[in-house]
Amino acid sequence: MSTPPIDDKTIGELREIAARYPEARSGLLPMLHLVQSVQGRITPEGIEACAAILDISPAEVNGVATFYTMYKKHGVGDYHVGVCTNTLCAVMGGDEIFARLKDHLDVGNDEVAVQRQGDSRTVSLEHIECNAACDYAPVVMVNWEFMDNQTPDSAVQMVEALRAGHDVSSTRGPKLCTWREAERVLAGFPDGRVDEGPTAGPASLVGLEIARERGWSAPDAVTTPAVEAEKKAEGSDG
């Protein structure tokens, strides 16, 4: 599949992102997501476009693009599957899930599985660090959406459904979109589906329920001498 160019529409949207911020350079992260939504990866052309708009060097853009693992210099699948292998997910079965998917898809880490005859979509696989979803360990993500309480069998069933082109919904979110569509949302162009599907589940709310049952509340903010001095200084400036 050929890589689409950075056309005038994309340049306009990159400029739109940069204009959202008091310091245009602050828009670099969503700008890179937009590049990925258009070209499927971070390309030299995309790096040059971001650098020109932000008036910084391509080396500076490249430094950011190679620092964060969400940015890819190579293509990924229509559905990018990330298995959390950090401590809690690992001991709850994340390592086993990742090993099973690698074997099932015949891929290594951060690789795209071969599209078989009959597959309508492609899938890639990556082990990722903590998803901040430990209450639902082991957790798998697909295009950055949560798939909670997974097992090796359920993970295999999920990737097969994705490859077949079936609709799959995240556990606490919307029906899964493609990776490029998700990247456009991360660039700050909503797809109108933010309220689709559940959000916080029971496991995330246990602490809140216990606090309500026992009448617990957060303590009042502690005021230190330094804070008092700052307040007085602000009052005198007024």
Image (cartoon, grey):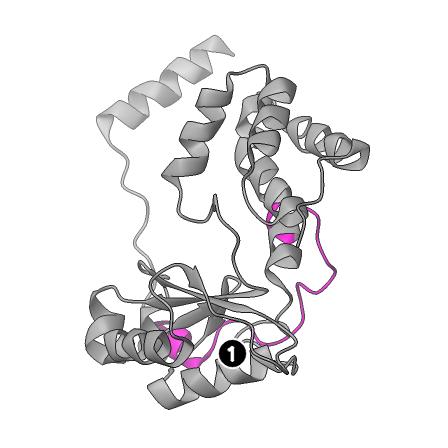
Q: Residue 123: horizontal and vertical position, in percent?
A: 52, 69
Q: Look at 77% across and 34% down and name the residue there.
A: 7
Question: Which quadrant of the figure has residue 195?
Answer: bottom right
Q: Residue 211: horizontal and vertical position, in percent?
A: 33, 73
Q: Residue 197: horizontal and vertical position, in percent?
A: 62, 76
Q: Quick check: 157 above or below 231?
A: below
Q: Quick check: 135 above or below 9?
A: below
Report the residue marked by disc 1.
171
Magenta-span inclusion, residue 187? yes
Q: Residue 64: horizontal and vertical position, in percent?
A: 43, 32
Magenta-span inclusion, residue 203? yes
Question: Which quadrant of the figure has residue 66?
Answer: top left
Q: Which span of residues is magenta-colored?
A: 185-211
Q: Of 108 and 84, which appears nearest the observer?
A: 108
In the shown orientation, is residue 155 left or right of residue 215? right
Evaluate whether residue 137 shows in this view.
no
In the shown orientation, is residue 213 left or right of residue 88? right
Q: Of 73 and 90, which appears nearest the observer?
A: 73
Q: Look at 60% across and 50% down and name the residue there.
A: 40
